[in-house]
Image (cartoon, coloured by chain):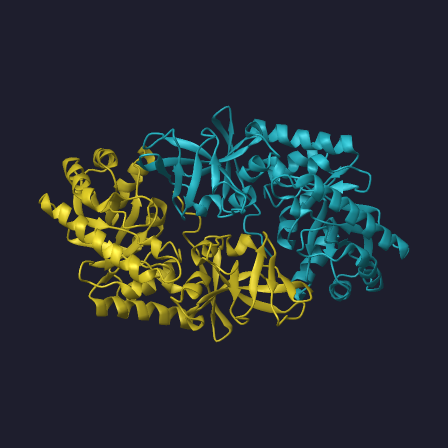
Chain colours: A yellow, B cyan
Amino acid sequence: MLTPFVAVDVTVLDANLRAMAEHAAAAGLALRPHAKTHKSPEIARRQLAYGAAGLTVATVSEAEVFQDAGDLFIAYPVWPSPERAARLRALKERVRLRVGVDSAESAEALGRAVPGLEVLVEVDSGHHRSGVAPEVAGDVAVAADKAGLTVRGVFTFPGHGYGPARQQRAAEDESAALATAAAAVSGHGLDASVRSGGSTPTAAHTGSRVLTEMRPGVYVFGDAQQLEMGTCDGDQVALTVTATVVSRSGRRFILDAGSKVLGADQQVWATGAGRLLDFPDARIVALSEHHATVESDDVPALGETVRVVPNHVCATVNLADELIVVDGGTVVDRWPVSARGANT
Amino acid sequence: MLTPFVAVDVTVLDANLRAMAEHAAAAGLALRPHAKTHKSPEIARRQLAYGAAGLTVATVSEAEVFQDAGDLFIAYPVWPSPERAARLRALKERVRLRVGVDSAESAEALGRAVPGLEVLVEVDSGHHRSGVAPEVAGDVAVAADKAGLTVRGVFTFPGHGYGPARQQRAAEDESAALATAAAAVSGHGLDASVRSGGSTPTAAHTGSRVLTEMRPGVYVFGDAQQLEMGTCDGDQVALTVTATVVSRSGRRFILDAGSKVLGADQQVWATGAGRLLDFPDARIVALSEHHATVESDDVPALGETVRVVPNHVCATVNLADELIVVDGGTVVDRWPVSARGANT
């Protein structure tokens, strides 16, 4: 097979799916995995078979791809432009649908466009992206209720847990923010029965004292960010990019996997632009569109293939048309990345 | 139309194509634009109509998409695995084909796999990626010749010209490296008549004293990197991502264009994760998969659309299935990104 290609080890994948399902069950939490990571109906089917309560998605077009799941949460402050509103109304007839809302103004627009839609109020627990301060979640809920939406609770994404040794604190922030927000919503006599949070890095620290639901995404595959945060091990990495050594000189070599297959994500604390699964001491010191420049004491031969662990697997999957499914080193299937590019 | 989407202003595009063609002609250089930027047969057709001598591509699969151009250079140290070699042999029958080579070992493999293939020796002019030191280009050329390849000259990519105020120096390095390498090849009695270099940032400094050919890519669209290097102006930006304001708070607002449509490229000297064409003082201070967090004194309304200039346009195009072609603000066409994902 021509390199580079994106390979998924189905045995490791299934072990990851099972482990998170067991963790959520043991913690007393509903598991609603984020499908943005895999964008694959086959993996969604397996997640549901392992007991997921439904799926999380990021966009209306992702929701359309995953509507067979029957129960979807668009964890995003959806703006109901006329065309998007029409698609939301159609989706709402076909699945149990919830969306995020983070202001009175967008609640009013959403209520006019999609009457009766179920919403969760988005809360900022420390990541400082979208979402309101927990204390004002009640005001947004009241506006949503007045606008004819059906409030079901609150949600947050503890994205500030991405970084070495930040997971415990981010999980505590998440829990505190959701508790405050839920109390604010309940204080207005509205439903706060869904308190949804979670991410792969914080999953081990997430409990059911406040939360009712968790939404991890990356856990299905793992990636170099998770490896470097210590939130997965090498034997939990289910997705790699197979690449060929095309040039070498001294301790450096060049792979034919660049940013157009791996993605260019690189957090400030990352040790490089990805890792090599079978060369743990190697570092990707530079990344172009079709070149990964690797430094390593152990240099493979020209023409040899190696397995690259991308920094951020969600980006990698979104660049691929299909996942090459392997089991024990043998190709056993190909799964289409059906929601690739589903950004709207 | 649902946001985010990738829009190309055809008037600006045509002006960019014409300007670079005129620059190359005035400098006495063949123009062989890099199709990796646009991945679009329609734009390739226009480049050839403006006088391009042929196209540059990065991969065999890109070459297959652009074979109608008739004259292709794969500017990459192609490793001839059996399947790739078969495709190279087929391509060689259909187009005038040249590929890069940067070691005796890969020359021998390539010569065995694709006898008679035309090659250019890749030289490192300061970017320190693939390519040999200029002084040893002759040795690689001799090995290629012995292996049954047809040596046509030398090439380099002055990628170290990406950065503020680095263009002049990188163009000088490029010229010096190609002169040394060409002399080394000629010194062995081999053909060094092609001396190919060039990139969009260095294009203004590239002349024909040494070079015979230039291979800029990004100039067709421009991007935020070029804006911030001063190598294009806002009125030369032909490609933007239209995005909707979905959340706002104080001086911050969130757009629905994230790394899954813009790409995550961000050089250390970049002021952010992209720019807003109509808000020159705004900065994208954070980028998630579906959120761009913008700081600006001037904050648009919720639901308003804005035009985002991505940092690195090659990454943006490679995430899109089609380019929405606009003229004077009206959609006039849609061009497929036929070589999207053509990484092999």
Q: Is residue B130 among the parts visible in the rendering? A: yes
Number of labelled discs? 0
Residue B44's x, y, as percent?
A: 64, 39
**Left or right: A325 as drawn, with respect to A290:** left
Question: Of all residues shown, which one is farthest toward the left?
Answer: A189
In the foreground, B15 or A311:
A311
Residue A182's x, y, as percent?
A: 16, 50
Q: Is residue A215 among the parts visible in the rendering? A: no
Q: Which residue lies at the image location 77% right of the left edge and 37% below the top edge?
A: B207
**Left or right: A297 as drawn, with respect to A271:** right
Residue A291's x, y, as percent?
A: 61, 56
Q: Which residue lies at the image location 77% right of the left edge and 66% below the top edge?
A: B108
Question: Which quarter shows the N terminus of chain A?
Answer: bottom right
Vertical position of residue B277 compared to residue B118: above or below: above
**Left or right: A282 as drawn, with respect to A22:** right
Which quadrant of the structure image shows residue B234?
top right
Which quadrant of the structure image shows residue A285?
bottom right
In the foreground, B58 or A182:
A182
Residue A328's x, y, as percent?
A: 48, 76
In the foreground, A300 or A148:
A300
